Structures are given as C-alpha cells and as structure tokens.
Amino acid sequence: MMSIVKLEIDDKDMSHIKMNIFNLQIQSLNASHRVETQEMTDLDIETIIANFEKINWRQQRVLQLQMDGQSSIFHVIHNESHEYLKMTLNAFSESEQFEFKIESNIQLIFPQRELFGLLTRKNKEVFVIKRGNLEQALQSLQAFLNQDKQQLEHIYLKSKAKPIPEAS
C-alpha cells in the first residue's frame, strides 16, 4: 500500500530562509584596449566564486596601466536584500601584490566603550577596505556570498589594525 503525502509550503513559512541568488557585473579590459562589461543574473555562490577565480588579474593590471583611467571591477549584488560588494583593482599599487578597493553598502556595528569604560555606544561603519590584497578580496567575497556579517566584521577590523613595527 502506497500513501501520498501532499506538502504545502506557505510563503510566510519560508520568510526566514534567505535565498542566496546574486547578480554579477564584471567590468574588464580586453587586449584591443576596450572596456567590456558582462552582466549575469540569478547566479549561485559557486558560479560567482568561479567567475572571480577565472579572471586574470595580472593581465587586467597590465591593461589598466596601458589604459590610464580605466578600472577592472567585480560587482556582486544580492537579489533579495540589494546589498552589494564591489571590488576595484588598483593598478597603481606600490607593491607587486594585487591591491583592491573593497566596498559594500553593508553597515557593520561595533561597540565602543566611553567614559572610562562605563558606557558602551554602538558605532556604525560601512564596509570599505581601501588597500586590500587578493586574499582579503576573496575572503570578503566568500563572507558576503554566505551573508556572514561576523566574518565581514573580522576582515574589516583586521584590515584596520596597524602592524606592529619590528624592533631593530
């Protein structure tokens, strides 16, 4: 004997589940010194990561230097919340390492102690890293795609920490 179960899901029951569907805009430079913009919609996390990893950042950096003023940009938008993460390659970085400006409209909230530690105030800051490396860009992208604000806060705070100078 076989029984059939009918499952009905009300939209209200699904309101707590966040859909991780994104739109992606990639502005890149090509060998014929033209700016190309690709727009893709309704992508999942794996597809976004694959698109980021397949970009030849070294080539983009060289082309940016040749086309002074043009930028390579990787811009991801969460369909539901309209939050975004935008990474712009800086071809004019001082080191050989890739450098990105990583920015988002996500507001991070940090507690700040005042008045001898007796009062705690909440500071709101927007996620912006002006001189991030490739690793920070990829970590920020993964945290953003997974909607992991705690990880974004960690990346942001780590980027703002000043390195301790070595004693000579």
Image: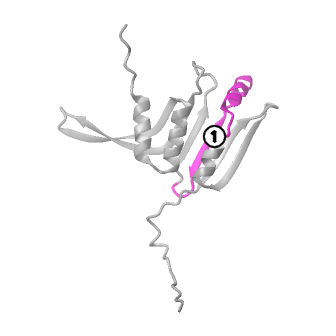
On the image, the x and y values in percent for residue 6 come to 52, 84
Farthest residue in the right direction?
32
Q: Is residue 64 found inside the magenta-colored segment of the image?
A: yes
On the image, the x and y values in percent for residue 35 come to 75, 36
* Stretch of the chain drawn in magenta: 54-81
Q: Nearer the viewer, residue 57 or 71?
A: 57
Going by the image, does 1 lie left or right of 34? left
Vertical arrangement, residue 68 with respect to residue 40, above or below:
above
Farthest residue in the bottom direction?
1
Q: Amino acid at mark 1?
A: Glu
Vertical arrangement, residue 117 with respect to residue 15, above or below:
above
Residue at x 60% of width, y 34% of height:
88
Residue at x 58% of width, y 37% of height:
87
Q: Is residue 39 found inside the magenta-colored segment of the image?
A: no
Residue at x 64% of width, y 25% of height:
91
Residue indicated by mark 1? 53
Secondary structure of the residue carrying tag 1 is helix
Farthest residue in the top direction?
168
Residue at x 39% of width, y 34% of height:
157
Q: Quadrant of the C terminus?
A: top left
Q: Nearer the viewer, residue 28 or 133?
A: 133
